[in-house]
């Protein structure tokens, strides 16, 4: 199938598929006589895998690791779990950081009168 069909099936933009092919995450199946990339069902499955992996926020290198494990029938689930646990820890750390920011910003918003005067604790804090 052509890249447009692969894009529809994988729910990825054509440009993203080209990028993933260029960095080696997915391989095109071949080229048409006029040089257009073609993809088979296996490539589309890999594209879907990459899309889902990226939706969870796995980095490109983590996605490469997961793809290698996906292709390895002798993989251990412990390897997969370790990568996912690392990502989960990253998410939990980010949540804590965002909660601190939310509280700080909430306090600043509450302390600002929001009137016509130039005095503003938000600007004072940022300055």
Image: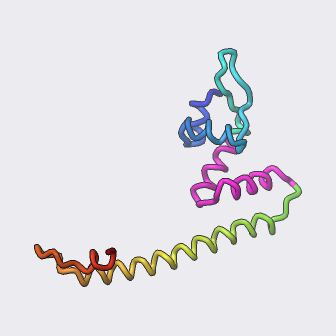
Q: Residue at x 67, y 38 (%)?
A: 22
The magenta segment is 44-73
How was the colour assigned to the protein in this rendering?
rainbow
Residue 97 place in picture, x, y as percent: 50, 77
Q: Is residue 61 magenta?
A: yes
Residue 86 place in picture, x, y as percent: 69, 70
**Quick one: 38 or 108, which is closer to the camera?**
108
Quarter occupied by residue 66? bottom right
Q: Is residue 1 magenta?
A: no
**Quick one: 102 or 108, which is closer to the camera?**
108
Q: Quadrant of the N terminus?
A: top right
Q: Residue at x 64, y 46 (%)?
A: 48
Q: Residue furthest top?
A: 33
Placement of 7 over or under 50, stated as above or below:
above
Report the magenta stretch's main SS. Answer: helix
Q: Residue furthest left?
A: 116
Placement of 56 over or under 8, stated as above or below:
below
Residue 101 place in picture, x, y as percent: 42, 77
Residue 24 place in picture, x, y as percent: 72, 42
Q: Residue furthest front?
A: 127
Quarter occupied by residue 47? top right
Q: Residue at x 56, y 35 (%)?
A: 14
**Quick one: 17 or 71, which is closer to the camera?**
17
């Amino acid at each position: 199938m052509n890249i447009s069909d692969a894009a529809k099936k994988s729910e990825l933009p054509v440009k993203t598929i080209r990028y993933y092919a260029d960095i080696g995450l997915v391989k095109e199946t071949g080229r048409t006589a006029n040089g257009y990339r073609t993809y088979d069902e296996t490539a589309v499955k890999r594209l879907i895998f990459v899309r889902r992996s990226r939706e969870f926020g796995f980095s490109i290198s983590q996605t490469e690791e997961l793809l290698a494990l996906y292709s390895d029938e002798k993989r251990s689930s412990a390897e997969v779990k370790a990568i996912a646990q690392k990502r989960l820890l990253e998410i939990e750390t980010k949540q804590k950081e965002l909660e601190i920011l939310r509280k700080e910003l909430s306090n600043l918003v509450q302390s600002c009168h929001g009137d016509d005067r130039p005095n503003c604790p938000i600007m004072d804090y940022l300055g």
